[in-house]
Every structure is written in structure tokens, then in C-alpha cells.
Image: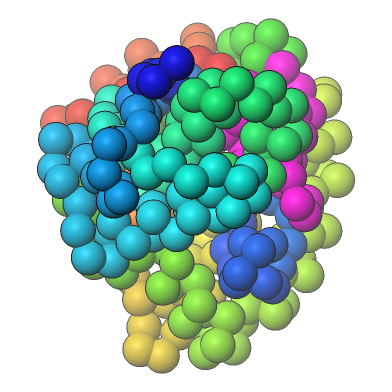
Amino acid sequence: MQTVTAQAPANIALIKYWGKRDEALMLPTKSSLSITLPGLTTTTTVSKSSTQEDTISIDNKKLSGKDKQKIVSFLNIFRSTYNIHDHFLIDSKNSFPTAAGLASSASGFAALAKGLNTLYNLELSPEELSQLARRGSGSACRSIYKGFALWEDYEARQLFTPDHWPELRVIAVIVNNQEKKVSSRVAMQQTIKTSPLYSQWVTRSEQRIPQIINAIKNKDLHMMGSLAEQDCIEMHACIQTTKPAIDYWIPETRVLMQQVQKLRHQKIPCYFTIDAGPNVKIITLDQHVNQITQVALGEFFCYTLAL
């Protein structure tokens, strides 16, 4: 087999991953927990190259420089791990904006790991695929699984399948589809080095993990959403207190946060979470989606996503 195509979904962290204790191995400073979003996917075609160079395109744009090197570094790890000497032609396309805080790196490296696994008939287990994907982007280890996934160390594992909570919905609201100016990887390093809030957030965030697992088990939207929202706010507070400060939020981000809080005062259950970017994800139930989109989202483009 010389050419394969693989897909992987993005995921949205409820309890955030932000920072590594080991940069080389991509091991996290703390646990994280996510919802996989099959409506946001990366489709990647991988084939063996006849040259001694990797050629990589994302959304029809040929990569070079640092953008290319990040993926080549992952390919070098793959080659070394599995004693493979080939180079590759890689063509990747996202069904959603790239590098805008919607976890395109997670779905991208998960899809690439799946494609390489199939290309060489390695028959890697989900855990092994998760470990491989992690070496490209930490959060990619969670995109191997459907439903809810927990990443604690070397790999992620599935906690609950999508049919555990079929009425749960995530509304991904696009307030800006441009590539963010500061990459997550750079911002993480800066946060660890300079934010006075970071170590305290790590401790509190880790403590939320058993609480949110219990909330998901019991399908307690209020508890799950409240924990996710607080974790998001505290993570961004860490980012915003780095030197120099990094602020991924734009005015529209803050407007949507306020709209979600206003809807809750009106007894409409919904909660926000935001990764490293301006775009907002609203967590709610299927029965409330139409009301939320009509009342709060206005002209914003959004994806309504089931598990």
C-alpha cells in the first residue's frame, strides 16, 4: 500500500492541557479531559515519496520553514521509532479554520498518526496510536478516541463513549477565523516561565478532574459546565499574566462570554469554554440549541456538534 487517507476529529478540553513537564517527550504538567467533536475533522492523505524530502501541504498551502519543521520532527520520531527510512508526501485538509483555537493540530497529528499506522500496517492499538499522536501535539492523543477522553501521562484513554450522553451539544462559535499570532506551543512555554498564577492553576485544575468525571458520569450539565468554565477562565488568566502578556480574547469573545452568562440567568443551561484562541465553544443540551443560536449568536458563524 503506497497511499492512504485517514481522518481524525478535533477535541475541546473541558479541563485544560496547558504546559509540559517534558518538552522532548510532550508530557503534560497535569491531566486534561476533553470532548471529541466529530463534526470538526482533518482528512490527511499520506504517500511514500520518491525523494529524500518530506513534502507537506495543509489546506492546499505547501509548508516551509518552522511550520514544516514541526511536522518533519514528528515524522523523524516516527521513522526512528519504527525503523522506517521513507520520506512522505502529505496533504491535509481541515473542515474548519486552521490554527484559530479549534484544535486543528490535535486532529491533524491524530489523522497523520492513523495514516502512517495504516500505510505500514503496524496495527497499533488505540493506546499506541495515542502515544504516537502525542509526540506531534499533546492534545492529539485525545483525538484518537470518540466521546470523552482523559490524558494523564503518556497516552489518553476513553472515559465515556458518545452514546453515554447523546443529547449533549457543543456549539463552536467562530468570531475570528484567522491564524493566531502566538502559537499554543510558544504561549505554553512563556506561561510556565513567567505567569505568577500558573502553579496554583495546575493544582486547582488537577483537583477538578475527579469532580468533572463524576459530573459526566451523572450527566450533570451544571456541575460539568461550571467546572469547565472556571478552568477556562483560570487558564486564560495565566496566559494574560505572562511577560509580555498574551491575550487570545477579542471583544467579540468577551461579548459571547457575557451572553452565555446572561442566558443562564434566564434559566437556559449553557456554559462556555475557550482554548488558545478567540473562538468560543458553548456547552448545552440539544433542546436548547435553537434558542441559544437565535438569542445570543447573531451574525456569528457556528457549528453545532453532537458527540
**Is 231 a magenta residue?**
no
Check the image and report above or below for 196 versus 41: below
For image coordinates 39% across by 55% down, the residue present is: 72
Check the image and report above or below for 176 versus 288: below
In screen coordinates, is 177 left or right of 128?
A: left
Residue 131 drawn at (x, y percent): 68, 44
Residue 168 drawn at (x, y percent): 58, 18
In screen coordinates, is 283 left or right of 202?
A: left
Quarter of the image that includes the N terminus: top left
Of residues 57 and 248, the one drawn nearer to the viewer in this rendering: 57
Quarter of the image that includes the C terminus: top right
Of residues 151 and 127, the one drawn nearer to the viewer in this rendering: 127
Of residues 234 and 94, the one drawn nearer to the viewer in this rendering: 94
Q: Quadrant of residue 91?
A: top left
For image coordinates 75% across by 34% down, the residue present is: 127
For image coordinates 67% across by 72% down, the residue present is: 22
Check the image and report above or below for 50 versus 187: above
Q: Is residue 173 visible?
A: no
Residue 224 drawn at (x, y percent): 69, 37
Q: Which residues are magenta?
A: 138-161
In screen coordinates, is 1 left or right of 143?
A: left
For image coordinates 77% across by 54% down, the residue present is: 153
Q: Is residue 146 visible?
A: yes
Of residues 226 and 207, the one drawn nearer to the viewer in this rendering: 207
